[in-house]
Image (spheres, rainbow, N blue to C red):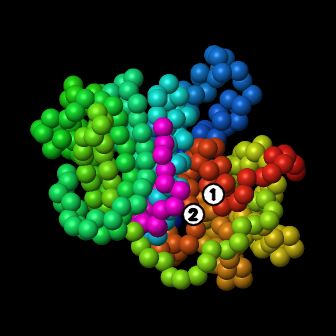
Amino acid sequence: MTDPTGIDLSQNAGLPLRSLTAEVAHEISNQLGCLVLLPDLILDTLPPDSPLANDMRQIRRAAHRIDELTLHLSLLSLDRDERASINLNLPVRGAFASFMSEHPEIKATSCLEDILPPVQGSGEWISILTGNLLRNAADAHPGGTITVATAPKNLLEDLDGWERIPQGAYAVLSVSDTGPALSPAHRAKLFEPYYTSNTLGRRSMSGLGMAVVRQLARRQGAFLDVRRTEEKTCIDIYFPTVVLPGGSNDEPPQHDRILVVDDREEQRNVISRILKSHGYRVSALAGGAEALVHLESSGADLIILDISLRRDREGLDLHAQIRLRWPSQRILLISGHPRETYADVLGRAGDCPFLKKPFRAEELLAAAENLLPVPSDRRSSE
């Protein structure tokens, strides 16, 4: 027996509420996938001032708002904290691109340090808190300027910020705006649920945005500071850095072949079309057996793998086989579940970049370009 979401209720009848909540959130995210990506494709064919273009942007914004709430539902279903070794810039860059696509009227700049030490955190959660910080900054001072930045920082002694930050090595995410200074009372209440004031401006994301920032920072072992500098209010998130084992990175790939493995035909096709439109040579398959045959005969410079393929553990098993047979293979994992769902299987440190469905075209392309050189000829070929 299934309900309208497509979830098999007979199989899930005995699941604890947390697990069932995660499954519902996952199915909603999968259904939203094309609702987010298709407007991107349609907008590429329309003039900017087309009334239909405005409708497409409104549909896309609504889908993202639903997904934000769905993602919060997924995170609430988890009963563990997740910290992996990741590059802070990747989720920050994706969140910034998504925010600017939704709000092209806002003046915002990014200043991301090229070389950052890896941090202890979750890319999915960092993306969420970055988006919340950007929305808060936009609400705090409409018409002002927002800046998002990353930088390494070594604290030689404890810092008495919004909270006490221990000495140590960090990569810091900073989001600032040119709004008015916060009073001490407002500063103390900034991360409380549903808190708002005339100084802070409109409430965003049902009033939970900054409270979510605080909780996700805590669950990743990160620390918060709120400061005033150069006529700007700045919120800093201090992420502890990690030291990786010795060894050099792999040489960059010489080709731009991408294999997309996703059992949902509509999403497989949309992802392939977006990548092809930006010059990547793409093959697309539905399952693990076909993917292994393709890799044995043709190989791939990057695999974009839906880790939650429908048939039992097919996605997880395929990932394990690829890692066993081709240890240096570049893989970008995608799923309607947050990455933390797979922590017990993939290992707490993880070994792959990850995008949660639904993702924006900009996020997909940023992840691909982070793993592969930008195609030199920008060809679209089958």
> From which residue to which does the magenta span run?
109-124
The amino acid beneath tag 1 is Asn
Residue in the image at 76% along x and 45% along y: 278
Residue in the image at 72% along x and 57% along y: 373
- Look at the picture and state if 268 lies above or below 259: above
Dot 1 alpha-carbon crowd within 10 angstroms: few under 14, some 14 to 19, many 20 or more: few
Q: Is residue 42 left or right of residue 28?
A: right
Q: Write down the residue under mark 2.
A: 353
Which is more N-terminal, label 1 or label 2?
Answer: 2
Q: Quadrant of the N terminus?
A: bottom right
- Look at the picture and state if 199 lies above or below 261: above
Q: Is residue 320 left or right of residue 231?
A: right
Instruction: Give 327 or 259, whichever is nearer the viewer.
Output: 327
Q: Position of residue 37 (x, y in %)?
A: 64, 41
Q: CA distance from mark 2 to mark 1?
A: 10 Å
Q: How many numbered badges does the structure rendering display? A: 2
Marks 1 and 2: in contact by CB < 8 Å? yes
Query: Can residue 184 be seen in this snapshot?
Result: yes
Q: Position of residue 379 (x, y in %)?
A: 85, 46
Residue in the image at 52% along x and 49% along y: 93
Query: Can residue 2 be seen in this snapshot?
Result: no
The amino acid beneath tag 2 is Pro
Answer with the quarter of the image where residue 319 lies: bottom right
* Label 1: which secondary element: helix
Q: Write down the residue under mark 1.
A: 370
Q: Position of residue 359 (x, y in %)?
A: 57, 47
